[in-house]
Image (cartoon, rainbow, N blue to C red):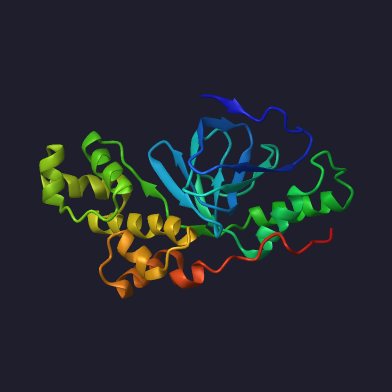
Amino acid sequence: MELRSPWLPHQQPVVAVTRHHEAGAVITPHAHARAQLVFADYGTMTLTTPGRRWIIGPREGLWIPPMVEHAIRVGDGPLLHCTIYVTAARPTGPAAACAVQMSDFLRHLVLEFTSRDMHYDQRDSTGNLARVLLDELADLDVVQIDLATGQDDRLMKVTEALLEEPQSELTLDDWGRRVGASSKTLERLFRQETGLTFKQWRQRVRVVRSIEVLNAGLSVSNAAHHVGYSNVSSYISAFKAVFGITPARYTRAPTGGNGKLEG
């Protein structure tokens, strides 16, 4: 497993870094000795850990504990990728990798922190911001948008195909014939390895994949049709069940780095 970011100042409890990536860029599998909070100021990205996948837009972040291998693929547009690194000496945040809600306050705080010198004096205003940030990271709201892909080869053929083509209308019987398993076996594997039924998993992947096209500027109705919904109202209801807000509200840009926080 490749370890990265050894250059981070080890004495600092929190360090922030921003990077710009072009559409389609790939960051190969690696890990860090520090925990991370990763989010997009703009753009979308797909983050993958062994057996799980997330599609992250500007309203979500991904918490990654230390030494968890992960890879990143940038979506169809440019990405400003922000990362907060938290030293292992200051454990905080969830115990497992998970998507979290990026409140406006947390976004402001992180973006302000990225503008500060990472070699800060912990007694000055940046040190104060670091302590506030640590408090915020200890109380993150988890968002259930992970897409478990499973371990069984037959199940993975189905989940990987649906991740690429969420609009597919193939039934579980159809998939069974394609991968060499009965529909009952596939349904059992979905429940055991993803925690969801086939229909629940397909609905989640459709909704989560839709944030890519919403962020790219597609209308709500076009986004719904793009991921396989013939009924826009059904798409809106499914989206709200996952994200807690409607897709129209989701597309309104969250307030970000325009304000200044005083430490």
Quarter containing the C terminus? bottom right
**Which residue lies at the image location 36% right of the left edge and 70% below the top edge?**
221
Across and down, in percent, residue 244 comes to 46, 69
Relative to 244, say whether 134 is above or below: above
Residue 263 appears left or right of 93: right
Across and down, in percent, residue 105 comes to 68, 64
Residue 207 appears left or right of 158: right
**Which residue lies at the image location 60% right of the left edge and 65% below the top edge?**
254
Residue found at the far top of this picture: 1
Q: Nearer the viewer, residue 234 or 89?
A: 234
Residue 160 seen from this side: yes
Relative to 224, say whether 130 is above or below: above
Residue 104 appears left or right of 160: right
Across and down, in percent, residue 1 comes to 51, 24
Residue found at the far bottom of this picture: 233
Picture quarter containing residue 118? top right
Q: Nearer the viewer, residue 27 or 94?
A: 27
Q: Count how many numbered circles sit on residues in the image.
A: 0
Residue 144 seen from this side: no
Picture quarter containing residue 208? bottom left
**Which residue lies at the image location 51% right of the left edge and 57% below the top edge?**
142
**Which residue lies at the image location 88% right of the left edge and 43% below the top edge?**
121
Picture quarter containing residue 196? bottom left
